[in-house]
Image (cartoon, helix red, strand yellow):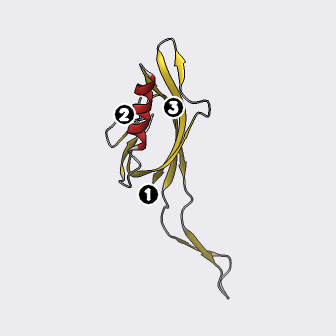
Amino acid sequence: MDPSFGGALVFGTACHVVHIPHPIAQQKDGFFGVTGMTSLYGGGRGRTFEVTGVLVGSSLSGVIAAEGALLACADGIARAFVDTQGRTWPNVIFEGEYLPSPEGPKSTDFGWCLPYRCILRGLT
């Protein structure tokens, strides 16, 4: 399944998504006269998604345009993210953490491609 961000298919093809939950907030403390420790749950602190994929186009300008469409999503707006397993994650933001292949776009028999890696942040 192709991942989407705010309903747009901006991640290209051959995508992999790694979901990394952040640790919960938790306060632990011990008190005089009480055996052991007490723990207070403070809620979740979001998650990180590492997305890897390949931007493709029939020409070099097509790949550059696909890259521009992805980078245009780094606008501070939280959107729904659908991962490669079909799970929908609300309130996800792209802060512009993007790393294209250091080799740059490559010509293939079928057009042009650019492998990349980017990070999305789940706020809830």
Q: Is residue 51 toward the left or the right of residue 103 in the image?
A: left
Residue wearing tag 2 = 9
Image position of 109 with respect to 77: above or below: above
In the rendered image, the residue lying farthest to the front is 61
**Is label 2 in a helix, a strand or a loop?**
loop
Mark 1 Cα within 10 Å, few/some/many (few <14, many 20+)?
some
The residue at the point 52 percent across, 28 percent down is 114
The residue at the point 39 percent across, 32 percent down is 65
Mark 2 Cα within 10 Å, few/some/many (few <14, many 20+)?
some
Q: CA distance from mark 1 to mark 3?
A: 23 Å
Residue wearing tag 1 = 123
Query: Which residue is more in the foreground, 103 or 1?
Result: 103
Q: CA distance from mark 3 to mark 2?
A: 12 Å
What is the number of the mark on residue 53?
3
**Is label 1 in a helix, a strand or a loop?**
loop
Image-quadrant location for residue 86: top left
- Of label 1 and label 3, which has the lower sequence position? 3
In which quadrant of the rendered image does the N terminus lie?
A: top left
Query: Residue 40, position in %: x, y?
Result: 54, 73
Q: Closer to us: mark 2 or mark 1?
A: 2
In which quadrant of the rendered image does the C terminus lie?
A: bottom left
Image position of 39 with respect to 84: above or below: below
Q: Are marks 1 and 3 in contact (CB under 8 Å)?
A: no
Amino acid type at image mark 2:
Leu
Image-quadrant location for residue 61: top left
In the rendered image, the residue lying farthest to the bottom is 32
Amino acid type at image mark 3:
Gly
What is the number of the mark on residue 89?
none
In the rendered image, the residue lying farthest to the top is 109
Query: Which residue is more in the foreground, 14 or 19?
Result: 14
In the rendered image, the residue lying farthest to the left is 7
- Of label 3 and label 2, which has the lower sequence position? 2
